[in-house]
Image (tube, rainbow, N blue to C red):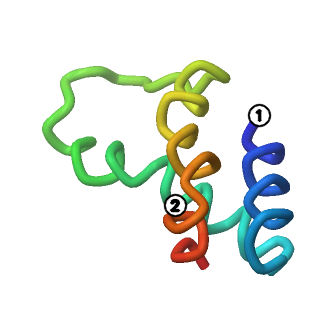
Amino acid sequence: ALAEYAFHVNQTAQNIGARRLYTIMERLLEELSFEAPEMKMGQVTINAAYVKQRLESVSQDEDLSKFIL
């Protein structure tokens, strides 16, 4: 699912290849990165549903996808 979002955004905006995948990963993990120290859980599972929830708005909003370098 993650690669599909990066591919879709590359197709609709400027194609920057693997750099897009890197920035999509940053966007996906952004919330967890900042909240992890306060979280009481020992593990976090990233599944397709989580990816879809966090990235669906990015792939649908053409203006927003242009800012994700």
Q: In the picture shown, does residue 11 fall above or below 30?
A: below
Mark number displayed over residue 30: none
> Which residue lies under the disc numbered 2?
26
The part of the image, by quadrant, that contains residue 11 is: bottom right
Q: In the picture shown, does residue 45 fall above or below 66?
A: above
Residue 44 as seen in the image, left or right of residue 40: right
- Residue name at image x 25 percent, y 53 percent: 34
**Residue 53, image x, y percentages:** 50, 29
- Residue name at image x 46 percent, y 49 percent: 29
Q: CA distance from mark 1 to mark 2?
A: 15 Å
The part of the image, by quadrant, that contains residue 47 is: top right
- Label pair 1/2, CB-CB below 8 angstroms: no
Callout 1: helix, strand or loop?
loop
Callout 2: helix, strand or loop?
helix
**Residue 60, image x, y percentages:** 60, 46
Determine crowd level at label 2: few under 14, some 14-19, many 20+ residues with C-alpha closer than 10 A: few
**Residue 19, image x, y percentages:** 74, 76
Mark number displayed over residue 1: 1
Determine crowd level at label 1: few under 14, some 14-19, many 20+ residues with C-alpha closer than 10 A: few
- Residue name at image x 59 percent, y 74 percent: 66
Relative to the observer, which residue lies in front, 22 or 44?
22
For marks 1 and 2 on the same chain, the one whose residue lies earlier in the sequence: 1
Relative to the observer, which residue lies in front, 31 or 62?
62
Relative to the observer, which residue lies in front, 38 or 22?
22
The part of the image, by quadrant, that contains residue 49 is: top right
- Pick the quarter of the image with the N terminus: top right
- Residue name at image x 50 percent, y 65 percent: 64
Q: Residue flagged by tag 1: what amino acid is it? A: Ala
**Residue 21, image x, y percentages:** 73, 62
Q: Residue flagged by tag 2: what amino acid is it? A: Glu
